Amino acid sequence: MSASGTGDAAAGIDVDGARRFAQRWAAAAGQLGYLPLSSAETVDILLGHTLRLAAAVTAATFSDEPGRDVGRALVDDHLTEPAVLDWTVSALGRDFLPLVLPHLADPAPARQRVSQLQGTLAGGYARALRNRVFAQQSSIRRAAWSARDAAEQALRDSEARFRAVFTGAAIGIGIADLTGRIIDVNQAFADMLGYPVAQLREVNVGQLFHPDDAPGMYQHYLELIEGKHDSVRVEKRYYRKDGRPIWTDLAVSLVRHDDGRPRFTVAMVEDISDRYEMQRRLRFQAEHDPLTELPNRVRFFDELAAALADDQQQVGVCFLDIDGFKSINDGLGHGVGDRVLTVVAQRLVASVADAGHLAARMGGDEFVILVYRCAGTTELVGVAQSVLTALAAPIHVDGHQLTVTASAAVVESAQAGRDPTDVMKAADTTLQWAKAAGRGRWAAFDPVRGAQDVTRSALAAALPAALDRGEFVVEYQPIVRLADGTTTAVEALVRWEHPQLGRLGPDRFVTLAEETGLIVRLGRWVLERSCRQASRWHAAYPHVPVVVSVNIAARQVSDPQLVAEVAGVLTRTGLPPHLLQLELTESAVMATGGEPLRALRRLADLGVRLAIDDFGTGYSNLAYLRRMPIHVLKLAGGFVEGMRADGPQGDRDERIVDALVRLAHALDLTVTAEAVETAKQARRLAALGCDQAQGWHFGRPVPADQITAALSRDQDQGPGQGPDRGPDATGP
């Protein structure tokens, strides 16, 4: 905002314009009623009111309280002629902004604020006037107890004052006898209800009650005329003569005889329809989504909590998420996305309207349906299928024909519990199951699977602290040369010594570490620990060289610091590079390109051996391996396990292994077979020319000290003479 002339530049208020507005205000007040002060004094007072209203309009945080204060001040300043209030409210809407705030860059917000100030000013004026009337009534009652010789004069004075207020009040005033027959009303009351004054004098107050309010109002009125209360104040509806209901703030007072018996009632009525409608709109906005007009998250949780609080009914939830909605927003724009959400909302409402279910928007592209008195999972599945079918019809938006699918989760309170948070947490978990299964599918909540997911989440959250506390250990599984049974390498396998769950294998936490990104840090720790142990073995048993094989995750391969870290570990531990082997999954190797591929070549140049783990479960592209600096192929355990079977199945897997071994040897690669559990498997692998093998037949993963003992025996007995199991050994 900006100001000119003598305006207040900081607030954007034109003080000269404010004075002109105050002068017009004072002139109107003088013409319409009695001024208790001089014209100049009145202008100064009204200028203060004008500036206060202007400050409220221009405030950074708006409050309508100044309007209420100015309304009260007008009554306090004795400007109580109703026409003055009419002029004031009209002038605020017509002249205030052009005169007082003429330089607003965007007058729309200011007009809205002025509109609210008009309402609060009128309300403050009415309340102050009503309070004055109450005060005057009190004065009348007190005057009645004055000396007898002044009683008649005081009564006439009070009646005159009351009549003046009664006639000129801006709020409705009515007087009724104890039967409810209206004795008199002022013009404001008659105008409010749209009746002539004379016609209202023939009406009983009960005829004006709104049907929904009548029972309660009759009870209030009955207690009042019986003298149980001196006053009653309520918000209630009246019917106008034209049939339109209006909301009012009603205050009814009981006037008693000198002996205390009830005599008649005086009612003061203020029309608050505009305020009530605004409150209704605000409540609707607070509880509904502005785009789809569906109940929002807040309203849904209120409804869900109320339904779950009733132990006599089961409640169901169908939680939906639109598949691939981000691609609609990104590809076609948010305008199209909003139109799609609107259509989805309409279809949801249409599909559940007859059943009385509640459809709500949780936010983004997530919707939810609340099924009251749910009959079980079967009913919920029916709801989900009905909704998914309704959404499957093409949506036409701005020339685009879009096919929308959604994933749905169905949860019943009998399985998820009576707490709203638990129910929605179960719904969210189940929705992830549905999405993982593919588009346009539904999934039902399974408490057992849910508990497993909770455990997974707890493990994922505990991983960093567990690594800090040293809860991880490394075990080593022997890898033997099939030709003579000599231990040539060991594979380092990490274990988690969980304080509550006991020892956990890598299948329980490695995937979680990859998902959370902790795999890089965990992998560094395993590499450091394994290389340090291998260096001790090399120093103690130099004539029994053992390669330590460490698994490297795909995320570690992409880490630009991988080569430097490996080189640093080798330097710190003193382990010769040729005694370190890094195992990578087949998918990680085949997807490697650019800088990761150069990193693998630099590792190979250091002398580090590289192996592909679980070969045969991924791309299985041996031609691609010619570009890779790979030294070892580790055959997936599934092929080796298949060789245990007799008949066509075992023969087929044996032929596959034979082909893989031949192709690997053609590429000058060493072949290691995994999951060897029987002597028969070992013999058949040796016959096929497989170089190395590991599995329970040769030894389970064990702590480092057991490997140390085996190496000591190998050094004493010589290669091939120790306890290591060769192809002819018996099973585990």
Image: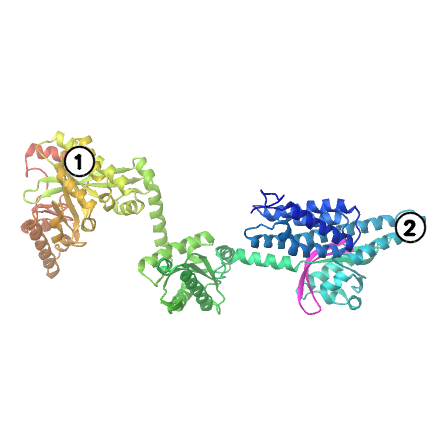
Q: Secondary structure at mark 1?
A: helix
- Rendered location of residue 704, percent (x, y): 19, 35
Nearer to us in this view, 704 or 23: 23
Question: Disc number at residue 706?
Answer: 1
Magenta-drawn stretch contains 248: yes
Please give the residue where the numbered disc 2 appears in the rendered image: 151
- Rendered location of residue 518, percent (x, y): 30, 42
Q: Secondary structure at mark 2?
A: helix
Classify 10 Å Cα crowding around label 2: few (below 14), some (14-19), many (20 and above): some
Residue at the location (11% across, 59% down)?
652
Q: Is residue 376 above or below residue 126?
A: below
Our reading of the magenta stretch's main secondary structure is strand
Real-space Cα distance between discs 2 and 1? 116 Å
Q: Identity of the amino acid at label 1?
A: Gln
Classify 10 Å Cα crowding around label 1: few (below 14), some (14-19), many (20 and above): few
Badge 2 vs badge 1, beta-carbon distance below 8 Å = no
Sequence-first disc among 2 and 1: 2
